[in-house]
Image: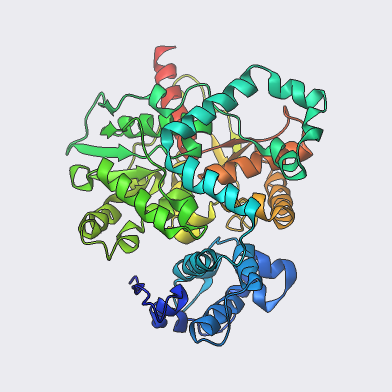
Amino acid sequence: MKSVVKTPTPQSANLLVGLDYSVLQQCMHCGLCLPTCPTYDETKLEKHGPRGRIALMRAIADGELAVSKAFGDEMYYCLGCLACTTACPAGVNYAELFETARAEVERQGVLDTPKRGLIRFWVVKFLFTRPRLLRLVGRALWLWQASGLQSFARRAGLTKLLPATLRRLEPQAPVIRRRFSHELMRPVEQPDRPADPARRVAVLTGCVQDLAFSEINRATVDVLLANGCEVHTPPVQPCCGSLHAHNGDLASARALARRQLDLFNPDAFDAVISNAGGCGSHLKTYGHLLHDDPASAAHAAAWDRKLKDIHEYLVAIDFRRPAGPVSRPAPTTPVTYHESCHLCHGQKISAQPRAILRALPGVDLRECAEAQWCCGSAGIYNITQPDTAARLQERKIDHVLATGAQTVATANPGCHLQLETGLRTVLSPGSAPRVAHPIVLLAEAYRAEHLSITD
C-alpha cells in the first residue's frame, strides 16, 4: 500500500519531516539489502548502503541532523536502482524515501552552484518539458552526425578543445535516428485481424526513446498490431517526468503527469503501454504523485490501473508465438538478457521478457551472471558519477561477454546506450554483440514469418 506524503506546514517545511513516519520506520536494519547494493559493494561503507541512507533520512526527520552538502552528495551517490526493494523482507518503500530525500536536497539548495543551476534549468526544467523543442535539438544533433561533421571533429581532434566534462560525455552521445516516432507511425493503426474481444491500446513514445530508438516504438506498434490490437500513438507526447522525479524536481514531475493525463484518457483504452523500464516504473506512480490533487487524483488512479509494460501486457493477453521459417530450421542465435533495474526491481517484471525471448524461433537464451545488477546508467548517473558508473559498466560487460551471446536484449534506453558504449570500448564495431530490445526481436520474428510464406 502506498503511503501518503503530508503537505509540509510552515513549522515543518522539511519534506522528510512531512513524510508519513511509518515509511521511515519500515526498515528493520537487518542488512539483507547490503549485498544487493552496488554502491555498498563498491565501498563497504554503511552510509553508502540503503540501511545507512535511511538512517540519515530518519535522523533528519527526527531533527537530529540537518540537511547538508554531505547528505546531498550521499543521496546522489545512490543509483536509485531499487535492488534493495527486491531484497527487503519488510517491504520498505525506498523509492519514495529516495525521491523525497532528493527533493529536500534540492529544496534546501545544499548542492547549488551557478553551473549546476544553469544545467538543471535548461535541461531538466526547460528542454525536457518541451517535446517540440527536444525534437528540434534532436534534429540538429542528427544533422551534426549524419553530415559527417561529428566524424570529422573526432578525426581532427577538435573534441579535445571541449571542456573536460563535455569531452568525456561526447563519445556517449546517442545516435539520433533520421525519423522520429511520429514519422514512423500513424496516430491510429488498425490490425489486419482484430482480436476477439477487441483490444484498444495507447503507446507512449518517450523522450530519448523517441529520438534515438524510434525503431523500438515502431516495433512495439507492429507487435501489438500482430496481436490484434488497435493502437493509438499521439504524435506529440510530453516527457513522463521520471527524469524530474528522480532528480528532486517533484513540481515538474507533477506538472508533466497532469499533461500526460490531459493527453490520454485511460478509460478509453484497455491498456496504456510503456516499453522503457525506467519510464514505466515512474508512470505507474501517477496515482501516488497526484493523490492530493482534487482535479487529477481519480484520473491518475485510473491511469495506474491501465499502465502496462509491453512485456507484461503481451504475456497477459497470451501473445502469439512466432512460427519459424517454413522451408528450413531457424539458425540458432545465442542471446542473453540484461534486466533494467526499474523493470525488474521497480515494476517486478522479470519473467515476462524471458518468456518472449524463449518464444523466438532459434533463440538460445543464455542467462547472464548478475543480470539484475545495475549497469551504471541509472538515468543520468553515468554523467553525475562517471567513475562508479564506469566500474559498473565494465563489470556488466565482462558478464555479458562470458555468455558468448551474439545479441544482448535489454528494455531501457539508458541500459541500451550503456551496454553499446561499453561493448565498443573492448571490441571492434564488427565483432561486438548486438544490443536490442526484446520487442524488436519479436517484431523481427513476425516479419520473418511473413517472408518465409512469400519466399
Relative image position of residue 403 (x, y in whole percent): 68, 46
Q: How many marks?
A: 0
Image side of residue 436 versus residue 237, left or right: right
Q: Quadrant of residue 44?
A: bottom right
Q: In the figure, 159 relative to 67: above or below?
A: above
Residue drawn at point x = 46 percent, y = 80 percent? 24
Residue drawn at point x = 64 percent, y = 16 percent? 147
Q: Nearer the viewer, residue 219 or 407?
A: 219
Image side of residue 217 versus residue 113, left or right: left
Q: Quadrant of the C terminus?
A: top left
Relative image position of residue 42 (x, y in whole percent): 73, 66
Residue drawn at point x = 22 percent, y = 34 percent? 195
Relative image position of residue 65 (x, y in whole percent): 58, 83
User: Does residue 410 appear anywhere in the picture?
Assistant: no
Relative image position of residue 124 (x, y in whole percent): 51, 48
Q: Nearer the viewer, residue 17 or 340?
A: 17
User: Does residue 353 appear anywhere in the picture?
Assistant: yes
Q: Quadrant of the N terminus?
A: bottom left
Q: Quadrant of residue 4?
A: bottom left
